[in-house]
Image: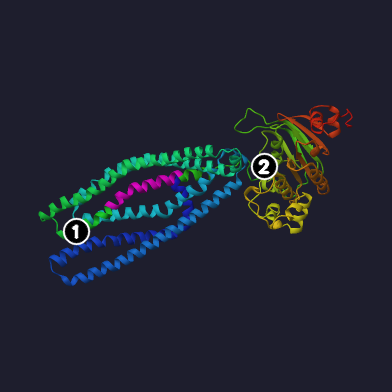
Amino acid sequence: MDSIKWIWQYIRPYRLQLFFALILIILASFISILYPLLGGKVIDLVVYQNKASLLVPILLIMIVSTLFRTLFRYCYQLLFERVGQNSLFQIREDLYKKLQALDFDFFNHTRVGDIMARMTGDTDAVRHFVSWVIYNILENLLLFIFAIGIMMTIDWKLTLALVAITPFIAILTVMMSQKAQPAFYEIRESFARLNSMVEENISGNRVVKAFAREEYEMQKFHEHNLDFKKRNLDSAEVSKKYLPVLDSLAGTLVIITLVFGGYLVMKGQMSLGDLVAFNGFLWMLNGPMRMSGWLINDVQRFIASSFKIRDMLQTEAKIPLHAEKSAHAIEGYVEFKNVSFHFEDDPTTDVLKNISLQAEPGQTIAILGETGAGKSTLVNLICRFYDPTSGQVLIDGEDARTWHVRELRQHIATVMQDIFLFSDTIEGNIAFGAPDASMEDVRRMARIADADHFIETMPESYDTIVGERGVGLSGGQKQRISLARALLKQPSILILDDTTSAVDMETEVKIQDELKKITHKTTTFIIAHRISSVKNADEILILRHGEIIERGNHAELLRKQGYYYEIYHKQLGTEVGTDGTE
């Protein structure tokens, strides 16, 4: 019932269309009962009573009623399909809107294939239920009820003999439903795993080919595909067990009608025309009984799919969108006050421990440390990709949790370590965060990021379409386009997460010189492994296991002769004095 209540909210706006479709179903079902009745009249009146003059009128009524029934069926099928497509459209809109509202935590724990399965296969199962299953249930139910009602008026004894089969069919249908639901749920889960595996292989196809692991990946796919086939065969086993029995029970209706009905005709308790009419009504009993198993399968498929869709729609983001304070203007003051953080699925491991720092507009804060020290996590707290588990991150003196998330991020630009470019033009990628920017501004930021010269050498310059995820571009080229994208946003806070790791030293120096010209009012956070990237920062933080073990500017840290001193010496291969001189 939860699934029915849920889907009703999507079809409710079209309830007038559904009401009209229901009227047409009733009319079409009512017309259907005329055929057997008129067929019986032909036998009794035309054949046995020689009233040949009635034959043509009866045939005309049958022809006209057939045309109307066909028209009515066409109309209500069209209406249900329209309602199904409209509902599907809105469900997909809601799912995609929910995807945009969910935060990193959801995507960290949800497979891409599972999300795609919900957006495609699951939504189509819902559309099929609305567009086809609902009207078939109504149609078959009405035909069954109308047929029983008319047959009772013709001969109640034969009708009861036929109806005696229905309890067995009802019991089998319930049993089949109980078996089918978990089977369809397993099919859906297996399909999601198969989707995830294929998506992962496509995204990582270069790694697969580089390591010549095609055979291994094909074997992996074979196992997932085999599992998907097995789940479908398990579902088929349920159908194989129950559907033949349901068909056999439905088939006994013909035997009962011929044997018991023939007996009543011979005894003179029933006319031959009535028996012919009865036989004509059999399809109205037989059809719904045979369809019940298939409809149950479709209903269970709908329930399994709707459960997964509803689960996603009901998922709440860990970072809520509502806020007390509007981020209409941010100057760029950032302060960490005793901040600690751990991921929800690993509460015993603190990624950050008691972090405190201050940054003012125009300052550059550099963060160094070993892999896994918590550098990226620290800057992610500024963007509110996560919230601290203890302590506070203050933006312009206000707790970041009081700011509206999306408005806050409008004033922050991040060049992430994992660079992503859309399958769009280079101009479109650079202007992603500032779609109204002029072409001159796009070019200016590309020049600052030292990207303009290689962009101009491309076939269509800034109109060149880059492949999915920027395939075809080098790592350094992608980094520079990503940097230009961040700079075009003109943020109050700029976060550069290992932004120039893939460019040569000469290019890095050129980019840093250009950045100084435009970031004198911007609070900049730089994560890097190269000393050359951070030596000019106002403050350098050294992280180890989530804790700040050293802090200060370049000269101060060299005088301490600690971790920073060691890294500096290893990278440059020079001896340094305690005063910071080389």
- Chief SS of the magenta region: helix
Residue pushed farthest bottom? 53
The residue singled out by tag 2 in the image is 418
The residue singled out by tag 1 in the image is 276
> Quadrant where the C terminus lies?
top right
Foreground residue among 124 and 210: 210
Foreground residue among 79 and 249: 249
Task: State the SS at label 2.
Answer: loop
Is residue 293 part of the magenta span, yes or no? yes
Residue 470 on image: x %, y %: 65, 48
Q: Is residue 359 visible in the rendered structure shown here? A: no
Bounds of the magenta segment: 286-304
Identify the residue shown where x is 27% and y is 51%: 286
Mark in front: 1 vs 2:
2
Question: Label 1, label 2: how many angstroms apart (C-alpha)?
Answer: 75 Å
Foreground residue among 232 and 223: 223
* Image mark for residue 138: none
Q: Is residue 121 visible in the rendered structure shown here? A: yes
Task: State the SS at label 1.
Answer: helix
